[in-house]
Amino acid sequence: MSRIRVAALALMRQDGTGEALLVVRKRGSTRFMLPGGKFEGAETETACLARELHEELGLTFDPDTAISLGRFEAEAANEPGHIVEAVVYRQQAAPGLNPVCGAEIEEIGWLALDDGAVDPAMLLAPLLTRELLPRLCAASPSRSPSPGA
């Protein structure tokens, strides 16, 4: 299988019920995923994120306030027969953050992490469902400890 290398951001915010994760749906896709995208040329991870977040959402990325979550892989959501290799950062959203749809972004959403339940109507990319959501939900400060924890 061919591999696609991307940089992505788990942008978190506090909402009325707990912590929420910013997800985006690209034009022509049915699945929501983390914002970010493919590297151009010899870009660094943080340069790729800065460019993608500005183009896609009108956001500024500050690498000094981001935490590297590591490298993950899963089948690509939009390119059958490909594996996506993602370097993922986590960052807390500034109060009043207002991302807007730009570039190829069709829809923006905030996915609540407080109880681990996901709206079944919101189709998510495999990277989110298999790799990142379990880790992010487990680390969410608003999530109450499970029995036996």
Image (cartoon, grey):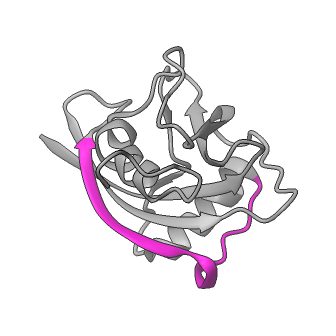
Q: Is residue 88 above or below residue 18?
A: below
Q: Quadrant of residue 53?
A: bottom right
Quarter of the rendering occupied by the C terminus: bottom left
In the displayed structure image, the side of residue 35 where residue 81 appears, left or right: left
Count of picture labels: 0
Q: Does residue 35 belong to the magenta stretch?
A: no
Identity of the residue furthest to the bottom in this view: 64
**Residue positioned 69% across, 55% down in the render:** 13
Q: Quadrant of residue 80?
A: top left
Q: Nearer the viewer, residue 109 or 145?
A: 145
In the displayed structure image, the side of residue 75 where residue 100 appears, left or right: right
Q: Nearer the viewer, residue 28 or 122?
A: 122
Q: Nearer the viewer, residue 137 or 55?
A: 137
**Residue positioned 71% across, 42% down in the render:** 17
Segment colored magenta? 58-74
Q: Nearer the viewer, residue 22 or 78?
A: 22
- Could you tell me residue 55's position as x and y percent? 68, 53
Q: Quadrant of residue 68?
A: bottom left
In the displayed structure image, the side of residue 145 where residue 26 appears, left or right: right
